[in-house]
Amino acid sequence: MAKRKEEMIRGAEISSDGNRAINKFRIGDALMMLVLVILCLTCVLPFIHLAAKSISSNSAVMAKSVFLWPKGLTFDAYASLFRDGSMVRSMIYSVWATMIFTLLGMIACTCAAYPLSKKRLKGRMFFTFVLMLPMYFGAGLIPSYLLMKDLHLLDTMWVLILPLIYSPYNMLIMKTFFQSSIPDSLEESAFLDGATNIQILFKIVLPLSKPILATLSLFYAVGRWNAYADNKYYIKTDTLKMIQYKLYQMVASATEAQTTTLSEAAAVTSTPEVLQAASIMFVTIPIICIYPFLQKYFVKGVMIGAVKG
């Protein structure tokens, strides 16, 4: 009887998959939790601080008394942003450019990854080598600028889209997913039924690849949304500047002289510091609203990319 009780206790300490269940809270666990909490706070607290400043009164912000809770609640900074048509137009333009960039990027990535994932493609290793070269080597800024100039892409929306739609890293992730997750037997059965490569891609492969499609679409969209360097180098017309570059200009222009970049029509009543905080929130909120619903795809994309084939 005692032996049976001992076996039951030992079995309770073993989980169903053979691993021992955690039945004690160790010092190491506490340290890990502390580190994770600190890392989370380094991400969350600056955001809360900016949010509090964006809806605080000018006097409270200038007195450096606003930390994690707003003082003198006011939405004048947001009202100024919406009255300034350039910020709203830039936001709409950025959304439109990001959608086009993501769509074309996924098309280019799929067209490169699917053939390279098939052993029946002759010269597959050579084409893979050529398409992976841009991941390790680049021509540099000046040659890239001269190329955009020769292609007549400078100061157009397409200079923000076409040069970056092909991503070797994203292609490698998608290629790995096709090789590891799509059984060859499915395609062989489709070939026996008379299906073409295009039909197999659209009717079999892509419907089974929704996780990686969502993951890479998010990679493309976030990458384009947060980038502003190409705006700085290739765009001169104010209406063609994306929202992140407009934000960069606003933050850079807020010098000790207390200047702002909003137009006079905005009727600015906020200090540059409050206006900067409101602008950052205005630019960041769209991504924050989308990210929680798609976070699992980010994690899955990282796991897929961890094993390259």
Image (tube, grey):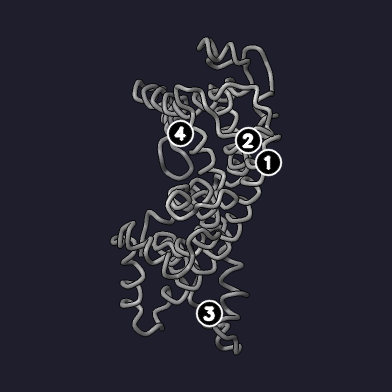
Q: CA distance from mark 4 to mark 3?
A: 55 Å
Residue 299 screen position, x and y as percent:
48, 47
Q: Amino acid at mark 1?
A: Gly
Q: Earlier in the sequence, mark 2 or mark 3?
A: 3
Q: Nearer the viewer, residue 155 or 208?
A: 155
Figure check: 67 above or below 242? above
Q: Looking at numbered disc 2 in the image, what kind of residue is underneath it?
A: Ser
Q: Residue at x 67, y 30 (%)?
A: 80
Gap between marks 3 and 1, in whole Å? 52 Å
Earlier residue among tags 1 and 2: 1
Q: Nearer the viewer, residue 237 or 116?
A: 237
* Separation of residues labelled 1 and 4 (CA atoms): 20 Å
Which residue position holds label 1? 85
Label 1, secondary structure: give it: helix
Q: Earlier in the sequence, mark 4 or mark 3?
A: 3
Q: Position of residue 226 (x, y in %)?
A: 50, 45
According to the image, label 4 marks what residue? 252
Looking at this view, is 228 or 30 the one in front? 228
Q: Are marks 3 and 1 in contact (CB under 8 Å)?
A: no
In this view, the mark in front (4 or 2) = 2
Mark 2 or mark 3, which is nearer to you?
A: 2
Three-letter amino acid code at the position of disc 3: Glu
* Secondary structure type for disc 3: helix
Check disc 2 and report its element: helix, strand or loop.
Answer: loop
Q: What residue is at 28 percent from the left and 61 percent from the top?
A: 137
The numbered mark at residue 263 is 2
Q: Are marks 1 and 2 in contact (CB under 8 Å)?
A: yes
- Say if mark 1 contacts mark 4, CB within 8 Å: no
Q: Where does residue 177 sit, x and y in percent of width and height?
A: 46, 63
Residue designated by label 3? 187
